[in-house]
Amino acid sequence: MIRQAIAIALLGVFGIIKMPAEKSLDAAQRQAGLRGTALNLDLREQVGQLSFLAALSGFRSPLAAFLWIEAHNAWERTEWGRMAALFDAVTTLQPRSLPYWDMAAWHMAWNASTAALQDTLQPSETLRIRNQRQYFRLGREYLERGIKNNPESFFLYRSLAVLLRDKFEDHCGAGEAFIRASQLPGAPGYLARFAGYEWAKCPGREQAAYDLLRALYDAEPGGRKPTLVTTLKELEKRLDVPIRQRINSEVE
């Protein structure tokens, strides 16, 4: 108890000393668009008094790394509820760290959801499926919150698109996420193509899919992938594109 009290006192003093610099840095980050997440009582309940004081004193990064290791340990023990609480704390501490958001979503939507579906202690298949979908939603929420904190990055939009495609089978939403990702700095070229593939499966978006994929086909003769050609041919038939306007039959 004495050691803990001394540690708390030292962290408090250090935090007070750093406060003017922290405020100046926070103002500069907000002006530059680097939006942080405020520390609140929810985080205090998740990490405990000493850890919360450490975060207030400027130790967000090492505390987040420590809690991430704890979350990994919870994953190995299949303690899904504890893992989710730790992920919430980590992403609150480091909202600008893309891998934290991405891995938290992956653990929820892929690992925890699979465990829920295969839960031998739950005899009801209906409830297992419901629990699985709940983890899908948790994964989506992590990515959407991550995007709010990092709107200029294609990385989380891409992960959201994959989640919507593979877990929700929401081809319309996946197409929107892929196209948004493709418009951001540093985005790989295939993301626009993937948006077209998803829109081709989205009722009412076939024309948008065709226009996008045809533009890519015409612009990149050396990048005419088999899937691109196959999808365009299917869309030409569905949209009744005149024969003379259709692409060549051979994959180039």
Image: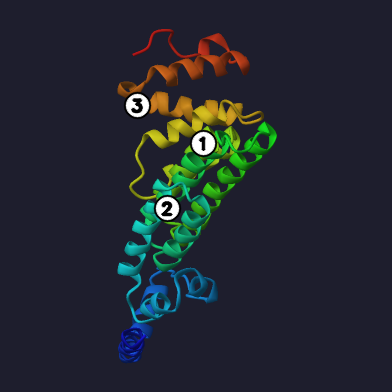
Tell me which corner region of the image, top left, top right, bottom left or bottom right, holds residue 22. bottom left
Q: Secondary structure at mark 3?
A: loop
Q: As shown in the figure, which amino acid type bears the numbered disc 2? A: Ala
Locate the C terminus and report the quarter of the image it occupies.
top left
Identify the residue position indicated by label 3 in the image: 220
Image location of residue 16, percent across then percent down: 35, 91
Compared with 129, 37 (above or below) is below
120 vs 3, left or right, is right
- Mark earlier in primary sequence (3, 1): 1
Count residues near mark 1 (Cα–Cα under 10 Å), then give few for <14, some for 14-19, many for 20+.
some
> Looking at the image, which is closer to me, 232 or 23?
23
Q: CA distance from mark 3 to mark 1?
A: 40 Å
Image location of residue 7, percent across then percent down: 31, 85
Count residues near mark 3 (Cα–Cα under 10 Å), then give few for <14, some for 14-19, many for 20+.
few
Q: CA distance from mark 2 to mark 3?
A: 47 Å
Of badges 3 and 1, the one in the foreground is 1
Identify the residue position indicated by label 2 in the image: 74
* Residue at image coords 43%, 49%: 156
Compared with 49, 127 (above or below) is above
Tell me which corner region of the image, top left, top right, bottom left or bottom right, holds residue 96. bottom left
Of badges 2 and 1, the one in the foreground is 2
Of badges 2 and 3, the one in the foreground is 2
Q: Secondary structure at mark 2?
A: helix
Image location of residue 153, percent across then percent down: 40, 53
Identify the residue position indicated by label 1 in the image: 114
